[in-house]
Image (spheres, rainbow, N blue to C red):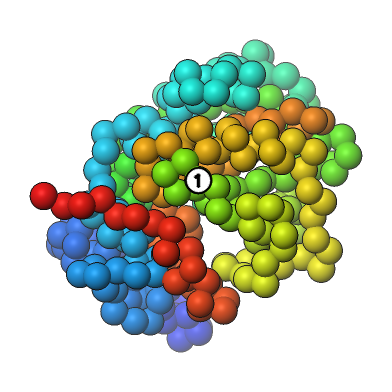
Amino acid sequence: MKIGSLIKHPKRVILKLLYWIAGCFTDNQYVRLYYRLHMGRRLNLESPTTFNEKLNWLKLNDHNPLYTQLVDKFSVKEYVASKVGNRYVIPTIGVWDTPEEIDWECLPTRFVLKTTHGGGNSGVIICKDKNSIDKQVIIKKLHQSLTQDLYKHSREWPYKNVSKKILAEPYLEDTETKELRDYKFFCFDGEVKFLFVASERQSRPEPYFDFYDANFNILAVKQGHPNSMISSRKPKCFEEMKVIASQLSIGIPHVRIDLYEVDGKVMFGEMTFYNMGGVVPFEPNQWDYIFGDYIKLPVQN
């Protein structure tokens, strides 16, 4: 990292240093430091009230073994099929342990490659024309993605034991919107309370995130990314989406269920337990408390 960059972005430098020496800290110590650096204030784990505080409490205290399967982008498909039906699961073309093992011949003209353990859209490679790709560039990117460790980076416990593999799926695109919009439902033990729509993820350097309530009324809130200038249309399958998200989240204090709508069909994307790592502020800040009110933390013995 250059000297100029060090001066302009000191927090990035500190976070990188923290990651390098992560093994020196207990999970509790690391989570507190990580939160303080991102949020600029002390993390209240003794009596958490905000959404971000409760997410970090859950990182440290809610270690349900099932969560490891649910964050694995390949193994979660079996769980989803058993709960809501296989028709909502994106088909799997192939799964490999290393990039060198990818069977390029079996891949269609358009496809998606992703790592099974990645987060934040990391490790996702979108190909719209197999004949124009540089396989060596893709292999290099996948090797880099396979080194990602969300447990070490932000102590997201479910990722600690996820098997790191490469997954191939067909490329999906809605005919009407000409993209694959991501509908991310905030669920609290089977109840959908909010969602945000991620749009223009491929056409812009930074996507739009627009928040809505459970009735698809737009909310004046931002988190991490800008709002778009135009509100998204309500998905045709919105009510079906809410039912699916509700069924998949029963028994879990909080999980974000990501779904797509593709030409009138609902498809499952992934499950996220710690939205934005539990360290990205809401604008305005009151929404951190509003979202947090819906998380009922498990009683500790």
Left or right of 260? Residue 280 is left
Counting other residues with Cα less than 10 Å from the Cα at mark 1, is it few (<14), some (14-19), or many (20 or more)? many
Give x and y (percent) for residue 299. Answer: 20, 52
Residue type highlighted by circle 1? Glu
273 and 171: which one is in front?
273
Q: What residue occupies the far left of the structure in this picture?
A: 301
Judge whether 289 appears above or below 64 on screen.
below
Extreme residue in the right direction: 176
Left or right: residue 249 compared with residue 174: left
What residue sits 29% from the left and 55% below the top?
A: 297
Horizontal side, residue 244 vs residue 215: left or right: left
Please indicate, yes or no, whether residue 137 appears anywhere in the rendered image: no
Query: Residue 16 in the image: x percent, y percent?
Result: 36, 67
**Quadrant including the N terminus:** bottom left
Q: With respect to residue 22, does 182 lie above or below? A: above
Q: Residue at x 59, y 23 (%)?
A: 89
Percent x, y for residue 157?
A: 29, 47
User: Residue 134 is drawn in which quadrant?
Assistant: top right
Q: Residue at x 55, y 47 (%)?
A: 192
Query: Which residue has dot 1 on it?
Result: 191
Residue 236 location (% of width, % of height): 80, 38
